[in-house]
Amino acid sequence: MSGPNYTSRRSRLVKAFKSAGVDSLLVSGVSNVRYLTGFTGDSTWLFLSKTNTILISDSRYTTQLANECREIDVDIRDARKPMAVAVAAVVKKSNGKLVGFETDHLTVAQHQTLTAKIESAELVPTSGLTERLREVKDNWELQQIREAIHLAERGIAVVRSSLRPNQTERDVRYTLEAAMRSFGATGPGFEPIVGVGPTAALPHAHAGELQVSESPILLIDWGAETHSGYRSDLTRVFFTGKITKQMKTVYETVLRAHQMAIAAIKPGAECRMVDGIARKIIADAGFEKYFGHGLGHGFGLDIHESVRMSPLSEQVFEPGMVVTVEPGIYLPGKFGVRIEDDILVTNDGHEVLSSVPREFDDAAVEFLA
Amino acid sequence: MSGPNYTSRRSRLVKAFKSAGVDSLLVSGVSNVRYLTGFTGDSTWLFLSKTNTILISDSRYTTQLANECREIDVDIRDARKPMAVAVAAVVKKSNGKLVGFETDHLTVAQHQTLTAKIESAELVPTSGLTERLREVKDNWELQQIREAIHLAERGIAVVRSSLRPNQTERDVRYTLEAAMRSFGATGPGFEPIVGVGPTAALPHAHAGELQVSESPILLIDWGAETHSGYRSDLTRVFFTGKITKQMKTVYETVLRAHQMAIAAIKPGAECRMVDGIARKIIADAGFEKYFGHGLGHGFGLDIHESVRMSPLSEQVFEPGMVVTVEPGIYLPGKFGVRIEDDILVTNDGHEVLSSVPREFDDAAVEFLA
């Protein structure tokens, strides 16, 4: 399969200019720049109009830009020239009059400086123009995401098969990262969460010094990143000892919420509705106040992307979207359970892209004596 | 040594309110929140006034906040309530009328939403209030930074002693990261740059597939992160084969620029002046256009912090500041050399905190047959 078609992506973005009320766009979000140009560095903004495609960068990136973005004009500023001054010159030369900027990727300070330097055009706020394109993955992107999932799944197989009672959360995290790299990942898709017992009740805990033997619950939330920058995001809970009745109830409740939510994913379904399915199952089982986060999110170049599944979401599923589904129940001071898979919205429903076993009986890990 | 005194840090911040024209401050920068409270998660903002210290977060972090920030009030919003709504309620209850926000850490979109939700007070732009405090490290922070440097130095010793001609840049990067972790680092302080020959001419290259044997120049820019979140930042160039006269000239020029710049660091010295010393040495040797970045930067919880040494800087050194000094010369398509150390500004001059050998004769690496 050939690589991504950056020209086509930019053309689709330019088509959205009219309804956004702009004649050009300043793209400053680092993943947006990568998506539209293939450039893998930072501190580099894209100015895009019908007739201009210009990357504004500095001399640290001269050679890298020449290698990665051969077909795109580059404006290199030296260490003496602030970004805003370079941008103002590009805007002036382009004759753009209504220059969109990304409200989600420009700080208030950057906006103030740009406003002061740009005299030849008006800065117009825009939101989510490129993110909207990124919601729906093309075939090349799906291939990258499948690879990121494959790398994550090979990694967790190593962790599971090498698990020992005296490993700390941190040991497990480092084993997992090294394994994913040995299979070809650049690294983890995000800081892996490895939580034993009470730590598993912290949805975003850092892996610490608890040993696997200190609780029968081990939660791992992990993913891989490919060299192309795409990520995966999975969670599994392992039983590493004799579990309580409550642990079983919680696991089965989370799994039911997870399965019923996934079953509802198809083109046209509302993200909020799918979130509500999982939330109701957890509430009906008496755990409403122990599921405080949204049900899932898009991912790709970033680990959290549009779309979002939460009670506040107003988005609707379309074919080509890829999202996590990750309900959880967290009992403070005791333990937590979350089960997370990666789901592709297809033309007539969905495909579960990840395949690590998730049934109750699959969660038990037996140690060799 | 006891841990950081968060209460004292917040008191000093509150003292800066008057001249900033605010009666309270909304801190949204993630490292600023950590510096002021010890909280290691994200998505959590601090509201601070003379009488209120409130962390506004969500239920993913309930337990973690209770563990890490025992003495601070916490306002937990559920998945249905946007951050801006929670903030508006806290602001209203506090009776703050002039609420500062961080222009460098609030996006234009977040600012728009906050402005719409906060009716009981005026939002006042501020810049660098907490960053200004973070420029000068306290004794506990210096201990953490020394540890981060120590971890980085132990890591590079492993790389150097195990270097093989057939290792790729990526192999070297992973060896380095694993070594630093084995000594107790959480991980690298940033994505390590490992560049062979032409890749070394890219100041911010990703480690790739070039083998060490493909050029006599190997550049490594690396650091470690401690469990407390503090970082180090170093660069060395190794000669892994017979070098050219030009390589020697470039190395010696960079080293002279590095040494002369460091010699000028003391309280009261202007950052721009120190940058100028290195820049002039490189220009006088005929390489002016091949040194495009600033001379150095502060670091600590973030890898790039205030202060900055560049031709644009208006800052002045004070005792307790810690900065990198990292001149470089990059010859596109050929090779690059950068030498970087970590410097503490002392009461009467400076201390070079890092000690990896850097003389010309130290750079040669001999392979075992």
Image: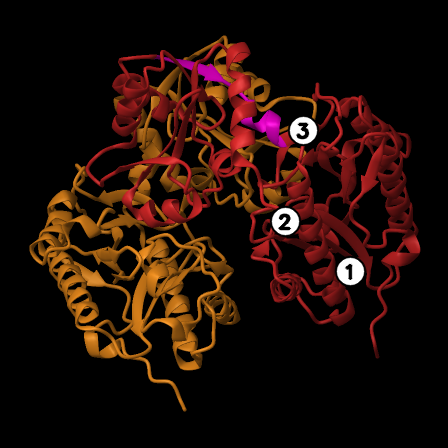
Chain colours: A orange, B red
Query: Looking at the rendering, which quadrant does residue B352 occupy?
Result: top right
The mark closer to the camera, 3 or 1, is 3
Q: In the rendered image, is residue B195 in sight?
A: no
Q: Earlier in the sequence, mark 1 or mark 2?
A: 2
Q: Is residue A286 visible?
A: yes
What residue appears at the point 91 percent right and 52 percent down from the top-left corner? B360
Q: Which residue is mark 1?
A: B215
- Residue contact between numbered discs 3 and 1, judged by CB atoms under 8 Å: no
A21 versus B214 height, above or below: above
Do pointers 3 and 1 mark residues of a single chain?
yes
For the C terminus of chain B, the image quarter is bottom right
Whether tag 2 and tag 3 are in contact, CB under 8 A, the answer is no
Name the residue tied to disc 3.
B307
Q: Position of residue A31 (x, y in %)?
A: 44, 41
Q: Secondary structure at mark 3?
A: strand
Quarter location, residue A133: top left
Q: Position of residue B185 (x, y in %)?
A: 60, 58
Provide the residue designation for mark 2: B205
Q: Which residues are magenta?
A: B122-134
Chain letter for mark 2, please: B
User: In terms of sequence position, does the residue under pointer 3 or pointer 1 come before the other?
Assistant: 1
Mark pair 1, 2: CA separation: 16 Å
Badge 1: chain ID: B
Spatial CA distance of label 3 from label 1 is 35 Å
Mark 2 is surrounded, within 10 Å at the Cα level, by few (under 14), some (14 to 19) or many (20 or more) other residues, namely many
Q: Residues within 10 Å of mark 3 (few under 14, many from 20)?
A: many
Coordinates of residue B32 in the picture (x, y in percent)? 51, 33
